[in-house]
Image (cartoon, rainbow, N blue to C red):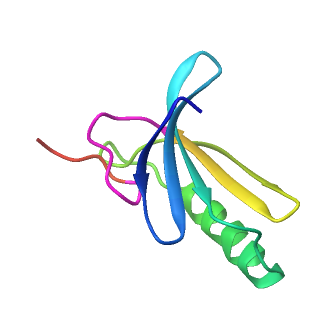
Amino acid sequence: FERKIAEGSLTRIYRGRWENQVVAIKTLRGILSSSAEEQFQREVAIVRRLKHPQIVSFYGASLEQGHACMVMEYTDHQSSCGFSKNLI
């Protein structure tokens, strides 16, 4: 992780590096309950299928010991949810 770029009540988004490229890393705060883990897995299943020029690319996710994160394409105009590209 290089630096925090956004923060919400449930998530933090960091700028970082993965496989020699700049990425956005969305982390969920705290340790997830089993139902929250299931919800995270459903979200990952949906996000991995999204393909559109105005939606950032999804690279991967991690769920270990109740901690979760997603790795996505980084753009300078990242939205607060981390999924859509801003048209400026």
x and y percentages locating residue 36 in the rendered image: 72, 78
x and y percentages locating residue 32 in the rendered image: 76, 73
Residue drawn at 40 percent across, 60 percent down: 81
Residue drawn at 61 percent across, 54 percent down: 27
- Quadrant of residue 80 in the image? bottom left
Q: Quadrant of the C terminus?
A: top left
**Image: 82 above or below 18:** below
- The part of the chain drawn in magenta is 73-83
Q: Is residue 27 visible?
A: yes
**Horizontally, is 66 left or right of 86 in the view?**
right
Magenta-span inclusion, residue 1: no
Magenta-span inclusion, residue 74: yes
Q: Quadrant of the N terminus?
A: top right
Residue at far left of view: 88
- Quadrant of residue 45 in the image? bottom right
Q: Is residue 82 visible?
A: no
**Horizontally, is 38 left or right of 53 in the view?**
right
**Image: 19 above or below 30:** above
Which one is in front, 33 or 4? 4
